[in-house]
Image (cartoon, rainbow, N blue to C red):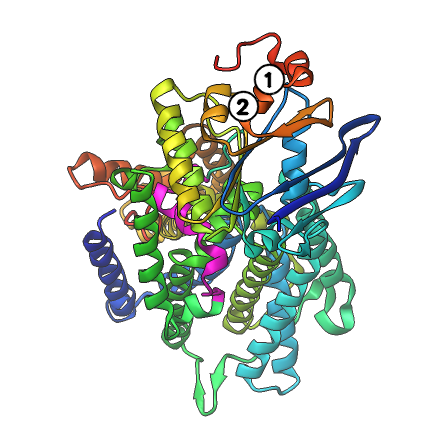
Amino acid sequence: MRSSIRAAVIVALTIGVAITPFVMTDRYILRILTFVGINLIMVAGLSLLFGYAGQISLGQAAFYGLGAYTSGYLAKAGVPWLLALVGGVAVAAIGGLLIALPSLRLKGHYLAMATLGFGEIMLFFFTETESVTGGSNGLRGIPAASIGPLEFATPVAKYFLVWSVVGIVLVLAANIVRRRPGRALRAIHGSETGAQACGIDTVRVKIQVFVLSAGLGGLAGVLYAHYVGFVSPSTFTLHYSLILVTMVALGGMGSLGGAVAGTVLLTLLPYVDAIIPGLPRSTVELIQDWTNDIYGMVLILVMLFMPRGLAGWATSLVTRFGERDRAGDSVGQGGGA
Amino acid sequence: MSMLSVRGVTKRFGGVTAVDDVSFEVFEGTIHAVIGPNGAGKSTAFNVMTGFDRPDAGSVVFEGATITGMRPHRIVRLGVVRTFQNTMLFDEMTALENVLVGMHARTRVGFLGAALSLPGVHAEERLAREQAHRILRLVDMDDVHAVPAGDLPHGQRRLLEIARALATEPRIMLLDEPAAGLNNVETAQLGETLRRIRDTGVTVVIVEHDMGLVMEVSDEIVVLNEGRKIAEGPPLLIQKDPAVIEAYLGEETPDA
């Protein structure tokens, strides 16, 4: 996609995100949009790992949980929020390192199974270590995020906190994917042997991207914990990990912009009544009752008929409208949101 | 002194000895061919020389340093690069991006530097892109720099893999059947390209079945049969070698 179009889309989205709390007084919608932001951070991490490097993870929810529990626990113990955040991200990143090491030898289905197993083990861990996590009752009374005297206690403040982090994360991730390390990730996806023959230390790069992806998962978990004020194991399930994979796949492998679009669409799906007010009650109920089935169908249909996802579709659309196709340019093609 | 020496290399797969006590020397500034019938152990020899396989015995020495057992990316960084019989391109990436990946070992920007746009990142990226375009021009492919490798015709894919290998700034290039699937015109162009590469100071080793090309461009030839070296020497001698004729050339004319 032409960089001018991309720039225009990014500017428009940024302005939209910035003015929404002022035009949208409905707190429910702000809450939904904050969750969109949290999911975007998760998906940015998964997009680097899965969308770019081609390493599937069905255990991202575990990193989300590690970040949320660590930070929640630390903050309740009186640790300042920024330190709790660093702790949450660090623990999740260490979790990523632990799963990266055995996963280096695994590919495809085997990697999927290993990461799925890791996610299930962590879920069990969250449930059973009651003294730290509160077990299935969860961890309650997590204080809101604060930096010194600045407290993010209102919905609008929380919204801006989360979306500021989203902005930073997306800029940093976009910087990575269009430069040397991003090319190394895509090379590993394309041909690991070929990547080695180009002098890429594939072991090192894979560990790096696992850790980075886990750290971003932890960051999202931290924001979630201090946003909701309560975490319990039911949030960090395989179900959530699968939805994240669906978001990346819908957006298009190897496209950050696509992943953003996929995340926004799928996160909003169950709240369609709040986003599009005029919808008939029966339609809304149908969508809400079948949300999970729709996710599953989206995944299957995208795999079958739209392997390049929304990003590939947007690219071909732009090409058709006479723009010169900058083929292979993979960043920021997500105008669909 | 030789640039690359293969010393008594043996590689077994189960009960099969793919390479059996093979030794040869590659001298700097030459084009060296490794030939032999299918299954002679040529590709296995390449794999051992570039770190993709570990030999069961013997060693490979590059400019005085033993490289056997090193991981492939380390060997690339020393200046030994290879291409593959079945091209190992990054099909979703453009021709230019493929070449840029080839420059990975010669550039430095990491995750943190790229993410934060630290000083020097832009300059390195710009220089890398300029260099990548130069390399594509060298193989006459700059006009297709924006085309995904997967959409390129076979002949250009072969050339692109050579371009990508050149981007690693090698001292020696090992090309595994670079002419496979090329037509006569493309093969002639490939011969030109190989000579041009040698003339820039890069030593070339090719595994090749196209005897016309081998006899035309090689300074030195090693012949393998059933994992063993059965002959070596300049093309004219190899063509007359009775062991070679029996093992390999007996069924085909040398310039087929």
Look at the image and give the residue range highlighted in magenta: B90-111
Q: Nearer the viewer, residue A63 or A240?
A: A63
Rate crowding at label 2 as few (under 14), some (14 to 19) or many (20 or more) other CA atoms within 10 Å. Answer: few
**Residue A279 coordinates in the image, percent (x, y):** 30, 43
Q: Which residue is mark 2?
A: B236
Q: Residue at x 46, y 40 (%)?
A: B90
Q: Nearer the viewer, residue A27 or B105?
A: B105
**Residue A27 coordinates in the image, percent (x, y):** 37, 67
Locate residue A141: give its quadrant: bottom right
* Numbered mark located on residue B240 in the image: 1
**Residue A319 coordinates in the image, percent (x, y):** 22, 37
Type of the residue with mark 2: Leu
Q: Chain of mark 2?
A: B
Q: Nearer the viewer, residue A32 or A83?
A: A83
Callout 2 touching callout 1 (CB < 8 Å): yes
Locate residue B114: give its quadrant: bottom left
* Whether residue A334 is visible: no
* Whether residue B169 is visible: yes
Locate residue B233: give its quadrant: top right
Q: Residue at x 64, y 63 (%)?
A: A232
Question: Relative to residue B226, is residue A211 drawn left or right?
Answer: left
SS for tag 1? helix
Image vertical order of residue A49 relative to residue B222, above or below: below
Image vertical order of residue A226 relative to residue B100, above or below: below
Is B102 in the magenta?
A: yes
Q: Nearer the viewer, residue A85 or B73?
A: B73
Question: Relative to residue B91, is residue B221 drawn left or right?
Answer: right
SS for tag 2? helix
